Image (cartoon, rainbow, N blue to C red):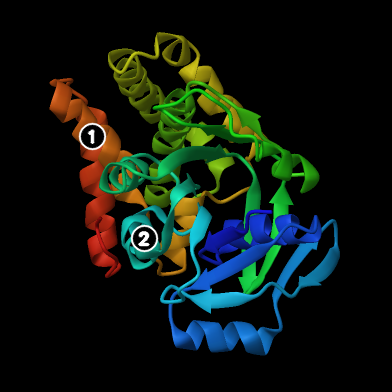
Amino acid sequence: MTTWHVLGAGSLGILWASRLARAGLPVQLILRNPDRLSDYRNAGGLRLTENGQTHLYRIPAELAQADTPIRRLLVACKAYDAENAVAQVASRFAASCETLLLQNGLGSQQAVASRWPAARCLFVSSTEGAYRQNGFHATFAGQGQNWLGDPNDSTAPAWLEDLVSASIPHRWTTDILGRLWHKLALNCAINPLTVLHDCRNGELRAHPQALDALCDELAALLVANGYPELAAGLAEDVRRVIEATAANYSSMYQDVHAGRRTEITYLLGHACSTAALIGLKVPHLDGLHRRLQTLLDRRGLPRD
């Protein structure tokens, strides 16, 4: 039975590792430094709260420098950390290693796939919700779906049965880039505006003109990248997400208010740079990008 090596113990890393371990599958956490490993051992394992019930999972953990081979790697760190994190363990890749990339936005997945072409890279687009309570304790906040795919190989791996055993909702898709582009467009329309207007998602109802302008440019970008069917319903999808998550604060809002680095480069930054590369004019997206970078500068946060 192949071990699931989980790189990163943030909210999604905890969520995936806990469910896999609960199903009796072999799981090994990889933590970034000795202090983090010591903290984990003092915590006694991972804690996951679901439906008001908290359970402890005593999953073994190690540092990147361990010498055991890696055949399956779940990369659950932030987009801006993904490539460097994988570089720390790449020397351990077995000949048939597969990586699952759980990052938000676009750009980090392609960077990993191009740097380690011998490893099969599967991209994951997740709509599941989880947030970290503290340390190694996360709460499962929302049911969703995990779309998995490989842009270079449409063949689904046999180990998807592991996800069935672990009750991890998933679907294999032959167009994972379309899924990721659609999610990126939704995030670009909603997240930056919630930061600039300092508001919950639902309060964006008060800014219909800004939403419409962004949706028009994002739809044009989707068409230019070969996704006209996603572009056609984008404005309606954005408003549907706003209504469904009206009481929530976006992930970018939460990052900014917690003083954390955002994933702006892999969301709004990726949209703007892709548009520039193909010669598509997106003045509202470019302006939003600049305004958000200025706000990050004022708060002393990285602008990338």
Mark yes or no: residue 75 visible.
no
**Residue position for label 2:** 90
Within 10 angstroms of label 1, few (less than 14), some, or many (20 or more) residues? many
Q: Quadrant of residue 231?
A: top left
Q: How far across and down, in percent of the image, does residue 78 sit?
A: 43, 57
Place of residue 23 in the rendered image (x, y in percent of width and height, measured from the top left): 80, 55
Under mark 2, the amino acid is Ala
Quarter of the picture containing the C terminus is bottom left
User: As displayed, is residue 14 above or below residue 178?
Assistant: below
Q: Amino acid at mark 1?
A: Cys
- Which secondary structure lies at badge 2? helix
Q: Nearer the viewer, residue 135 or 83?
A: 83
Residue denoted by label 1: 272
Q: Position of residue 224 (x, y in %)?
A: 28, 15
Q: Quadrant of residue 27?
A: bottom right
Rendered residue at 65%/35% (across/down)? 158
Which residue is depicted at the point 26% across and 48% down? Answer: 115
**Along the line of sight, the residue nearer the viewer: 207 or 291:** 291
Image quarter of residue 127: top right
Residue pictured at 26% horizontal, 63% vertical: 302
Residue 243 position in % (x across, y down): 63, 32
Q: Residues within 10 Å of mark 2 (few under 14, many from 20)?
A: some
34 over 74 or under it: above or below: below
